[in-house]
Amino acid sequence: MHTDTERCVRAVQSKDARFDGWFFTAVLTTRIYCRPSCPVVPPKVENMTFYPSAAACQQAGFRACKRCRPDTTPGSPEWNARADVVARAMRLIRDGVVDREGVPGLAGRLGYSTRQIERQLLAELGAGPLALARAQRAQTARILIETTELPLAAVAFAAGFSSIRTFNDTVREVFALAPGELRTRAARGARPHTPGAIALRLPFRAPLNPDNLFGHLAATGVPGVEEWRDGAYRRTLTLPYGHGIAELTPHPDHIGCLLSLTDLRDLTHAISRCRWLLDLDADPVAVDGELGNDPLLAPMVDKAPGRRVPRTVDAAEFAVRAVLGQQVSTAAARTHAARLVTAHGVPVEDTRGGLTHLFPSPRALAALDPESLALPRSRRTTLTTLVGALAAGSLTLGVDSDWDEARARLLELPGFGPWTVEVIAMRGLGDPDAFLATDLGIRRAAGELGLPSTPAALTARAAAWRPWRAYAVQYLWATDSHPINNLPV
């Protein structure tokens, strides 16, 4: 979008928050860059230039605005709606892969050379993978500086910097303030402090309807791994350097996020997983605008706009849970998953609630005895084949997955039909166009609305909702009185 100067200027002059994260405005006279909704008086048109990413702004020598804090905007929804190599690379960079594995590790995961990855990212984002990762490290450092009492040297290494000097230089360059000055400014408006935890606000594009989002996560939560407590969804996280607990609370203008981590180097990954879980980088205006063009869906969209797709923090975990949920009730699926967690999950301590375990890894589940599973024999075969493929690496599921390829690989496994594959694509892989045409709840809702209720006919009718059919699923599910559609009391 940053190449459409006229459209960008209109967004800046109207301070339209819907475009935050889509592009950034750099001001040639002041050498600062802002989000489109910056509250200051817009600069003259001739002094504006536009960039597709904060990293591109920084690379061009601009520093972040201290008023609108463009580094805290929601991510571009484009990377969640696409499955090409650039989108997959951006999702991996947000997860901190470049910090942990370098650019060769990023390229290796995507099956491209480092030169190809750098060329494609430069063409679309105006910055290469190192610059994009550097911008993300700067934001992680700012969060740690402003929300913790860690020594600044510890902040530097926790944020992923290789040296204190690089940390100091980057913070000064990006924010025009030294790390100590950032901490002093933050202390003036001190926030409530939770010992041993990092508190932050996760932004999103309005509107956001929390009912089905948190209702689904709470109603299907695995005991010991997930819980709803005191108005917040809480769950354990398996992270690259350790583990953690995330506590997510819906508010009208943000999601409150409280993270307890065993290793602060996992902060970037934990934030990325929480945003992915809640689909916070979605563009609800684009989604609802398209779905609202259908006269049968329009009343539901108008009644409760801004529905998100409840996702997962780990696609492999969700694939296991999807198999356990085949042809059984939500309560039965939770019971089966809880037994696996108790038998094979890693115990954790939770001083603030009732979380007890991490969800077991595919490697841990690969060693289970099929006879210990209270499942039909065919379902045991499906589960053991799945975890065996995940543990061996012959099947990989994650934010970097090619959606079509992942579908094909899953369909090769015994016991995997359209429903299981599509629910994994929707909630595990984040495909916004996944569609559960065979789901009983969807077919029932379709019949009540006057839509075709047979899978083939419904799929043909749903072609008009592309590429947002996963969001149409949320609106169709909402016609039922199931607990997944209601914010827990």
Image (cartoon, grey):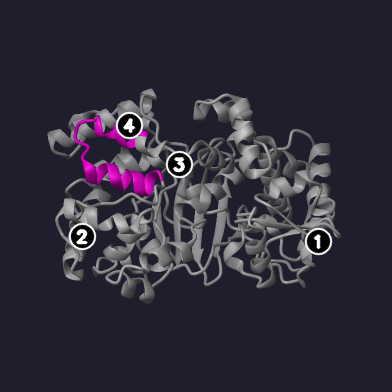
Residue 276 falls left or right of residue 118: left
Q: Nearer the viewer, residue 147 or 469?
A: 469
Task: Measure the C-alpha gap from mark 1 to mark 4.
Answer: 59 Å
Amino acid type, residue under disc 4 in the picture: Leu
Q: Earlier in the sequence, mark 4 or mark 2?
A: 4
> Where are the magenta residues, as a range?
405-429
Q: Which residue is mark 2?
A: 441
Amino acid type, residue under disc 1 in the picture: Asn
Q: Quadrant of the C terminus?
A: bottom left
SS for dot 1: helix
Which mark lies nearer to you, 1 or 2?
1
Q: Quadrant of the N terminus?
A: bottom right
Q: Residue at x 17, y 40 (%)?
A: 374
Q: Which residue is mark 1?
A: 47
Task: Measure the C-alpha gap from mark 3 to mark 4.
Answer: 29 Å
Disc 4 and disc 2 in contact, CB within 8 angstroms: no
Q: Is residue 411 magenta-colored?
A: yes
When asked about the image quadrant of residue 405, the answer is top left
Q: Earlier in the sequence, mark 1 or mark 4?
A: 1
State the image coordinates of residue 297 (x, y, percent, origin top left).
30, 69
- Rendered image: mark on residue 83: 3
